[in-house]
Amino acid sequence: MQDFHATIAQGGDPTKLLLWIGILIVAVVLLFVVLMLAKRKLLGPDKPSAADRGLLDDLRRMRDAGEITPEEYDAARKSMAAKIAGKPTPKPKPTHAGPEHNTHG
């Protein structure tokens, strides 16, 4: 390193220094990009998308208009929240549409 300083002090060619500075800058930028991509892949998106927000607004409007029940709204809202958080979506509870007992004899 002292030879390098001596070369620069004597009016030598600084191209080696500039080359190494350029290589270091490129390496730092590449490392930053790789870290940001890894963060996005591991943590997912930072905020819900505009489509998710619009869907939630539509669900709210449908609930208020009586097109869906409050229970259906809550189930859909929880499913969306789980999707955004990256968690598995809870399965909806089946509604009981059949007879209360077995009619086969």
Image (tube, grey):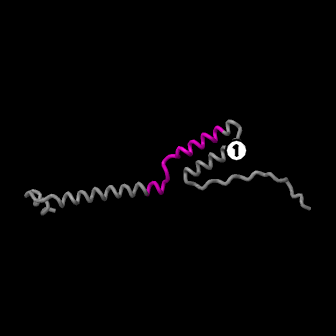
Residue 48 position, x and y percent, is 53, 46
Q: Is residue 70 left or right of residue 57?
A: right
> In the rendered structure, which amino acid carries the disc numbered 1?
Glu
**Location of the N terminus (image quadrant):** bottom left
Residue 91 position, x and y percent, is 67, 54
Residue nearest the viewer, comparing 102 with 63: 63
Magenta residues, start to end: 38-61
Overall secondary structure of the magenta section: helix
Residue appearing at x 34%, y 58% in the figure:
30
Residue appearing at x 48%, y 54% in the figure:
43
Residue labelled with disc 1:
71
Residue placed furthest toward the left: 10
Label 1 Cα neighbours within 10 Å, binned few <14 / some 14-19 / many ≥20: few
Q: Is residue 101 above or below residue 68?
A: below
Q: Is mark 1 on a helix, strand or loop?
A: helix
Q: In this view, does 18 lie to the left or right of 96?
A: left
Q: Is residue 77 left or right of residue 95?
A: left
